Amino acid sequence: MTISKKQKPNQPEPGQKPSQPDDSQLTPWQKANLEYQKQNQQAANWSPTVIEGTKEKPEVEALPLDLFDEELAEPELGTRPAAEATMPFADRLPKVKYQRNNRLYRRMVLLILLLLIPLIGVVYYVSPLSKLAAVTVSGNQKVAATAIIKEAKFTTETDLWPQFFQSSTHLQQVKKAQPRVKSVSLAITKLNHFKIHVTEYQEVAVLAHDNKYSPILENGQVLTETMKNPTEKLPILENLADQKRITQVLAAYHGLSQELQEAVSQIKYEPTGSNKELLRLYMNDGNQVIVNISNMTSQMKYYSQVAKEMKEDGVIDMEVGIFSYPYGNDKKTESSTDATESSETEGNQAAAEDVPKSE
């Protein structure tokens, strides 16, 4: 593609001589220049700029085709591409219909959901699924399931969700009424069933009192229920009534190794005027151990070694140091201890009398 130059006005056709302009149309400078060109026998290389009051149009140079290609390659903003502009409307119509139908489908699904959700809620509310059908218990060992359900006070055939949201109050009633219950939780099963999961405190000892035995839980609480025969695997505690003291004894007992725990059959609390922590442990091998509550864990680890050195069953005293003696010397040792304590008491009283009284 080329663009030709426009012909100048008064330009002669090929093969013809250029016509000389009229002197009336020339300016004084043009006339002088024309005379100069005639004298030198040269043709004028200019044309009148103003002829009959019209201006001469400037020449238009030919532009390269690459420039037009670049301009066509970068359409202005807001204009459609050439391919799309030339696409007939009949070809674009299916795409327009598809987009319009797609929007309609989305709106229809949204409206259906807005109407369907409340409808499902109403149907569920009036259906039997919204009522509590049954309550079951799992994890219980000593506490009866019927007792737990009774204390929880869940009502069947009534609304499920109000009871579920208030379940913390119901479960607290179970823990208060059943001291064996350590923790309790609630879950929904089969859409409208409650399942209560219970974790119980373990029995760690037995308390002997009034020729009866009561189980002691791991938190130190003594149950009011009684048993005729104590469990063989649990130690028997005697002369213990304070729950705080029971907790201290159990903590010291559980600090022992598994072998030593199984070797202890009975723990008797025998406090004295100078020592409120004194215990007497009855061992399964026939020996007895006198030890403080606070020193039980650290000193009982030497029991096996001391027991092997004993020629016969007896007492191993760990109250102050560690020494042992057979049962035959037990009374002598106790009498000598009492005499020592009485002499010390008399000496203290005499010393007190010698001190002068202040005025």
Image (cartoon, helix red, strand yellow):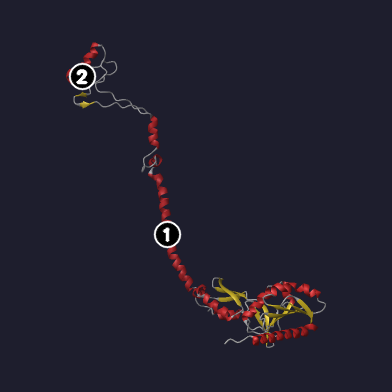
Residue 182 percent across, percent down from the top left = 60, 75
From the image, tell me which residue sits under label 2.
29
Q: Amino acid at mark 1?
A: Met
Pick the front one: 233 or 128: 233
Q: Is any part of residue 131 visible from this angle?
A: no
Tag 1 secondary structure: helix
Pick the front one: 176 or 80: 176
Image quadrant in which you'd find residue 22: top left
Pick the front one: 258 or 34: 258
Residue at the location (43% across, 57% down)? 106
Pick the front one: 26 or 219: 219
| Few, some or many residues within 10 Å of mark 1 (<14, 14–19, 20+) | few
Q: Is residue 252 above or below residue 40?
A: below
Residue 349 percent across, percent down from the top left = 66, 87
Is residue 22 rendered to the left or right of residue 297? left
From the image, tell me which residue sits under label 1.
108
Residue 257 percent across, percent down from the top left = 71, 71
Q: Are marks 1 and 2 in contact (CB under 8 Å)?
A: no
Q: Is residue 26 above or below residue 228?
A: above
